[in-house]
Image: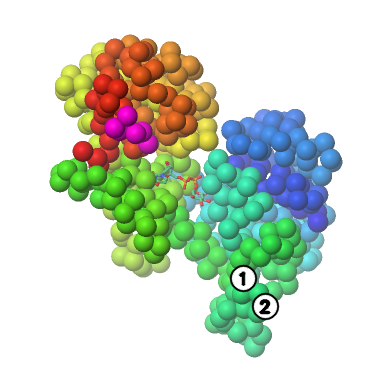
Amino acid sequence: MKLSVIGCGYLGAVHAAAMASIGHEVVGIDVDERKIASLSAGEAPFFEPGLPEILSEGIASGKLRFTTDMAEAKGAKVHFIGVGTPQQKDGYAADLTYVNAAVDALLPYLSPGDIVAGKSTVPVGTAAELAPRIEAAGATLVWNPEFLREGWAVQDTIDPDRLVVGVPSTGSGSGDEAGSGSGDGSESRSSTGSGSVDSNAADVLREVYHPAVAKGTPFIVTDLATAELVKVSANAFLATKISFINAMAEIAEVTGADVTQLADAIGHDARIGRRFLGAGIGFGGGCLPKDIRAFAARAEELGRGESVSFLREVDAINLRRRERAVQLVVTALGEDVVGKKVTVLGAAFKPHSDDIRDSPALDVAVRLKGLGAEVTVTDPEALENAKRQHPQLNYIEERDDALRDADVVVVVTEWDEYRRQLSPEHAGSLVADKVIVDGRNCLDAAAWRAAGWTYYGMGRP
Ligand code: UGA
């Protein structure tokens, strides 16, 4: 199928390349000329495992191309909108400037029968507002939220754990009933109450995602508002889970309990599950923090602020944990931080990524620098981005060089280079003082202590 992908940032670039890799003919469109030049040369403008390979393959096969010219969207059957929805500069709500601009720019090139599939994370109600403009061009707007994780983006796009498509109501017809759908049990439909959903558009999306659909991936067809809400509520739930365990870490800290053992123990309950119960310096990145804030802001607009007021608490717990890590370093240095050599292992908001947007790791480094420490940061992938944003910190590429003569080491991103491949004995031979703060609870505390280190974890004795 001919597809266009508008917006070639994280989501769009991966989506375009992944769609080409499953056989579609794809054009990726972005206003950023540098990004388009890089992608056209088969180079990913950010670190994402597996992306360079599918980019080069797609370009070489002729199935994938990139351009700044929106006119090239003409002729595509489905147009995916994958532009960013950052936090507004002066508030918590999402900034929809790029979504509106993408739709406006696309309108002249839509043909009757085309489908516009929104993938960007938007406040609930956005699709309903956009739909009339798209329908006036004879096209149909669907919302098809994306659940990819950075670091696993290619795999998550080609082989997602579920597909969700919100389609417009077809009016007051008596078509599909609400409830679970036909056939294989992996599909469900719901109506909006005012009429049945337009399943033709959903069928086109089924065809787009044919390999995943063929292997029985749950394919949920719903209304536009539900599709928008599925996305933000999924991220809100994940953020809440992380802040829940971090709140338990705070209680563990005053009681001598160990939050990692607690997480293991409650995680065995299948209703709870161990994933996303990693206590530490908390969540960051381009999604979870801004999505929970935008959700809370949207709920306020809808007169339902109290329904998600707990998300303010989720945010507050999350930010407190960064400060807790800083406190632990101050304690470890005997309250005397000025001029002390602090080595920070990690800059990215999580491993397998060079993304430093709202990175808890860099936040901790910057706060320590603010207290007067001499801070050296290392990271396998994120140093270039970090340097640009925080030129006041020292950056050293080689892990061992960064560790040399440190008075204290702080682990803030759980890369394998620190978690698995760094032995306490080897690290001990490099530093000035064997003191480590494990901001991600990712080290074997007993092994580090046995090698003579003073070990501090987050919510661990
Ligand atoms: C998140 C969601 O997981 C994706 O499903 C979603 O598609 C994406 O946002 C998005 O909206 O685009 P991502 O931002 O790539 O994906 O990162 P996560 O893997 O969710 O991690 C987010 C943060 O939580 C990281 O800083 C990570 O270190 C932290 N985290 C994660 C914890 O502190 N503890 C945990 O147990 C797990």
Identify the residue shown where x is 78% and y is 41%: 58
User: In this orientation, which residue lies closer to the viewer: 6 or 387?
Assistant: 387
Residue that carries the numbered disc 1 in the rendered image: 186
Q: Quadrant of the C terminus?
A: top left
Q: Is residue 36 left or right of residue 385?
A: right
How packed mark 2 is, by other alpha carbons closer than 10 Å (few <14, some 14-19, many 20 or more), is few
Colour scheme employed for the rendering of this structure: rainbow
At mark 1, the secondary structure is loop
At mark 2, the secondary structure is loop
Question: Residue 323, percent across and down?
Answer: 26, 36
Work out whether residue 81 can be spotted.
Answer: no
| Contact? badges 2 and 1 (CB < 8 Å) | yes
Identify the residue shown where x is 22% and y is 16%: 338
User: In this orientation, which residue lies closer to the viewer: 456 or 53?
Assistant: 456
Position of residue 79 relative to residue 257, above or below, is: below
Question: Residue 31, percent across and down?
Answer: 67, 39
Quarter of image, res 187: bottom right
Q: Is residue 277 left or right of residue 156?
A: left
Total number of numbered discs in the rendering:
2
Residue type at mark 2: give it.
Gly
Identify the residue shown where x is 84% and y is 40%: 61
Question: Residue 186, percent across and down?
Answer: 61, 70
Residue that carries the numbered disc 2 in the rendered image: 183
Question: Residue 121, percent across and down?
Answer: 53, 54
Q: Determine the CA span between mark 2 and mark 1.
A: 8 Å
Magenta residues, as a range? 442-447
How packed mark 1 is, by other alpha carbons closer than 10 Å (few <14, some 14-19, many 20 or more), is some
Position of residue 249 relative to residue 49, above or below, is: below
Residue type at mark 1: give it.
Ser
